Image (spheres, helix red, strand yellow):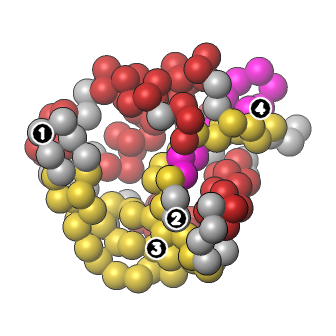
Amino acid sequence: MTALIRSAQAEDADAVAAIWYSGWGDGHLGHVPEELVAIRTKESFWTRAAERVADTTVAVEGDEVAGFVMVVGDEVEQVYVSRDHRGSGIAAVLLAEAERQVKANGHADAWLAVATGNARARRFYERSGWSDAGAFDYPAGTDSGPIPVPCHRYVKPV
């Protein structure tokens, strides 16, 4: 079965939040400052997913959301696939859609940030044609201001 790619709807927010919460833990715990972990509560993902519906594109397999991307301007902000659908090719389809959106937003290059210790994600982006442009501190947004997170900036012409 081929995933349906579409803009997220408000009713997708719960599924997006569940995927985001689980996937964020997999890719970030042990790789980001404890200060950020403390405020990335389960509830915070549900709040943020509901607030970000307009920036979100989902992949739907059957009747369930299998993954999502969030794109703002030239940045691919989030790429997550549910544990049940990892290895299915959905991540590549979502990433290609994110690249298409960045180009449609009028940009020649897309970029994204990956936590330095998230080796699995870094390998995926490299296999997908993205280049590691080096280490930097990503300012993770919080209600109390940004928290610097050690990341690598990946870039790709679109």
Q: x, y (%) of residue 24? A: 38, 42
Residue 154: give its label: 3
Residue 95: give its label: none
Task: Pick whichever, 80 or 30, lies toward us.
Answer: 80
Q: CA distance from mark 3 to mark 4?
A: 28 Å
Q: x, y (%) of residue 88? A: 72, 47
Quarter of the figure with the C terminus: bottom right
Q: Where are the magenta residues, as a range?
A: 60-71
Task: Pick whichever, 149 or 83, lies toward us.
Answer: 149
Residue 74: give its label: 2
Residue type at mark 2 is Asp
Q: Earlier in the sequence, mark 4 or mark 1?
A: 4
Decide: marks 1, 3 in contact (CB < 8 A)? no
Q: Is 139 on the left or on the right of 34, as rendered?
A: right
Any part of residue 99 in sight: no
- At 74% from the left and 32% from the top, the residue drawn is 60
In the rendered image, the residue lying farthest to the front is 106
Q: For numbered disc 2, what is the local secondary structure?
A: loop
- At 52% from the left and 64% from the top, the residue drawn is 74
Q: CA distance from mark 4 to mark 1?
A: 37 Å
Task: Pick whichever, 120 or 135, lies toward us.
Answer: 135
- Residue hosting label 1: 144
Q: Earlier in the sequence, mark 2 or mark 4?
A: 4
